Image (cartoon, rainbow, N blue to C red):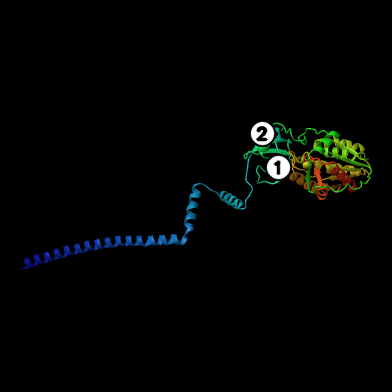
Amino acid sequence: MKKITYILSLLIVITLIGCGNTESSDTSEAETTFLEESLITDTAAEEPQAESDSEETGDNDNESLEADEGSEESYTDSDIADSETESDSGNENSLPEYTVTAFEESRTMYASDPVNVRKGPSTDFEIVGFLGFGQDVTVTGQADTKWYEIQYGEDTAFVSNKYLQDEMPVNETAAKSDAGAAETASAQDSEAAASQEEQPKQGDTPQPVTEVKNVAGVILVGDSRFVQMQNSVGANSCTWIAESGKGYNWFSEKAITRIDSCVGKGSKILINLGVNDTSNLQKYISLVNAKADEWVSKGATVYYSSVNPVWENPYVNEEQVEYFNSQMKGSLNGNVHWIDSHSYLTSIGYKLVDGLHYSEETYQNLYAYYMSCL
């Protein structure tokens, strides 16, 4: 009986042990399932959180990405600053950038038409002067815009490549002027010019010639306009230093010497040059200022007359004349008296016979006006 009881007890124990292992296995499986579900749940919870973070940060995430990409490209703070500067300058409509290729040797070229001279190689840049028809310039290089870099006074400037050529241009129908070809200054030419159809400007009929004031010691310095004025006014007491087709080079190399030879106390020097070479504006300013100081120290009085109006011609236009006058007037020193004969002729009326030269009556009016200013 005891043996049977022992066996039954043993069986019960074995059964209980087997049941315990099953529960443990179930428990282990349950724990595993719970862990897996927790991982899935946590992952699912994290994903909305990431989306939420993205929504909150917005563009900041993009900026971070760009910053990371930038670091891979090795951008520096200076690169970013330059980029911002370029962006800002673009908003301010800054002048276009350009590069210039210098020629190994400078070359002489000629203006095929009247043309503006600018600070930079495009029409976006400021006008600093002009070239007349046939005006020669020293070309030192060419910009990537194809415009030529030229020597302009003490500085460099630019002219469109469309208006500069290697050979002196020829215009057989126009009067020879600032291109360096001399005009004939004879009385016959004056009469022939007067016989041409006259072109009225700012008034068809000039006012009657005023009485001419007699002024002693007058030295008149100019180009073909003064040559023709001398022929128009006849006998007078002035010293005329004038030649046709001349400009700065003649003034500096020949006219100055002749003025120096006759200037003295009481002399009145009146200069009227520039229509043939408005491009030499700065040279005129420098030389006239320097010589005026010297002549004034000798007892003379110095005057500079504005370049007078022009009409249609192949050499110079009215815009160039007005620019030349405004710069001269503002740049001459206190020893030079400015005479605005351009405004005087505009106010009374005048007649041009070939775009550059005037009728006899206009010259006589102008001469009388000059004498009244001295």
Neighbor class of circle 2 (other Cα within 10 Å; few <14, some 14-19, many 20+) is few
Place residue 54 in its image quadrant: bottom left
Residue corresponding to mark 2: 103
Q: Is residue 373 above or below residue 223?
A: below
What number of labels is visible? 2
Asked which secondary structure carries label 2, the reply is strand
Neighbor class of circle 1 (other Cα within 10 Å; few <14, some 14-19, many 20+) is many
Which amino acid is tagged 2?
Answer: Phe
Q: Position of residue 98 (x, y in %)?
A: 63, 42
Q: Position of residue 325 (x, y in %)?
A: 79, 46
Quadrant location of the N terminus? bottom left
Q: Could you tell me if residue 330 is visible in this image?
A: yes
Separation of residues labelled 1 and 2 (CA atoms): 22 Å
Place residue 253 in its image quadrant: top right
Which amino acid is tagged 1?
Answer: Asn
Q: Nearer the viewer, residue 276 or 359?
A: 359
Q: Residue at x 86, y 40 (%)?
A: 229
Q: Position of residue 17 (x, y in %)?
A: 17, 63
Which comes before the other along the chain, label 1 or label 2? 2
Q: Position of residue 274 (x, y in %)?
A: 79, 41
Image depth: mark 1 or mark 2 in front: 1
Q: Is residue 158 left or right of residue 297?
A: left
Q: Nearer the viewer, residue 259 or 358?
A: 358
Q: Could you tell me if residue 186 is visible in this image?
A: no
Asked which secondary structure carries label 1, the reply is strand
Q: Residue at x 12, y 66 (%)?
A: 12
Q: Are marks 1 and 2 in contact (CB under 8 Å)?
A: no
Q: Residue at x 19, y 62 (%)?
A: 22
Place residue 13 in its image quadrant: bottom left
Q: Give the number of the disc on residue 116.
A: 1
